[in-house]
Amino acid sequence: MTAAVGAALTMVLAGCGGEGGEDRSGAGRDQGKAGQSEREDARAVLAAAAKKTAAQSSYKTVQTGQGGTDRAEMLYQKKPAASVIKAEVSKSAANPNGVSHMLSTGGSTYVKTDKVPGKRWYSMDLGGGEDGGGAPRAAGYVAEFAGALAATESTEWVAEEKAGGRTADHYRGKVVLDELAKYTGPALSEDRRDLYVTMAKKQGMKSVVIDMWVGKDDLILKSRETGRSKKGREVINEEYSDFGAVPAISAPPAGSVATWDEFIAAQARP
């Protein structure tokens, strides 16, 4: 499934903070059995991880391998809702360096620019609520990936591996979209399920393989979706970090922000 910068997908918000149940760090546990009971119930582990990460305050996502966006670094803040997205995009006259830098908060989206004399940003209204529509994108695909895996019977534990320098349990499942479309359990809401299935099918996909790495504290550290679309093999990789440690996101100083009309007028100048 692919999405352009600023796409308003509704997703569970991931991050960190200490809320949401006991971890699986292994204190007092027989490590020789390698957490067998948790790993045998991979779907329950993933559902719990999605629930815990949904309660967290902020985090960073690095996304690669998606459609027209080769790399994006995204910061998500839960309250007040805000996000920052820096993404590689196609170079153009308006964006010769090929980097899009957007900040969304308070119902507005601000885009970094050097095209308006005396200004560093211009503002635009994308709709999508008080965050300007950026937070869903910045949240990545945690909810869809974790929910789809938790809803899929084939999901299983793969191995204990490192993700982002931390020990994690690796889970994998093959998600058949027609089967997921019929799912009615608690792991994935009907609206989110339908959105995920519809967008994947629009890409020409019939199934996807999803890998997810869950840390010993039940926070999701990494995910990967692989599928075959009309254009060929599609891969989305996401790595999550800085849980609860993202610096506060706020709007740029008013004096540094041009209006949309001022930006358009500046573009029209020779």
Image (cartoon, grey):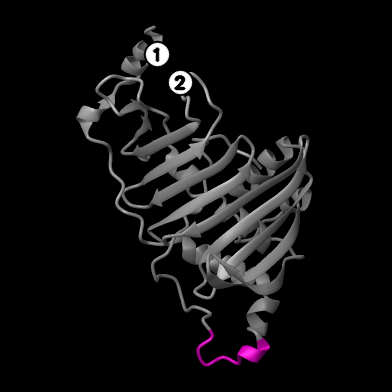
- Residue 193, position as x, y percentages in the image: 64, 49
Is 125 or 34 nearer to us in this picture?
Answer: 34
Q: Which residues are magenta?
A: 26-33
- Residue 195, position as x, y percentages in the image: 62, 42
- Residue 42, position as x, y percentages in the image: 67, 72
- Residue 140, position as x, y percentages in the image: 53, 49
CB within 8 Å, label 2 to label 1: yes
Residue displayed at 38% across by 27% down? 125
Residue displayed at 48% across by 49% down? 139
Q: Is residue 85 above or below residue 256?
A: below
Q: Is residue 66 above or below residue 187?
A: above
Side (left or right) of 95 relative to 252? right
The answer to whether any part of residue 134 appears in the image is yes
Question: Toward which corner of the image does residue 59 lie, by quadrant?
Answer: bottom left
Q: What number is the disc on residue 94?
A: 2
The answer to whether any part of residue 129 appears in the image is no
Q: What number is the disc on residue 267?
A: 1
Q: Helix or strand or loop: what does disc 1 sit on? A: helix
Q: Amino acid at mark 2?
A: Ala
Question: Local crowd at mark 2 within 10 Å, few (<14), some, or many (≥20)?
Answer: few
How far apart are the alpha carbons under marks 2 and 1? 7 Å
Q: What number is the disc on residue 242?
A: none
In the image, is residue 28 part of the stretch drawn in magenta?
A: yes
Side (left or right) of 256 relative to 199? left
Is 181 or 255 nearer to us in this picture?
Answer: 255
Residue displayed at 41% across by 31% down? 127
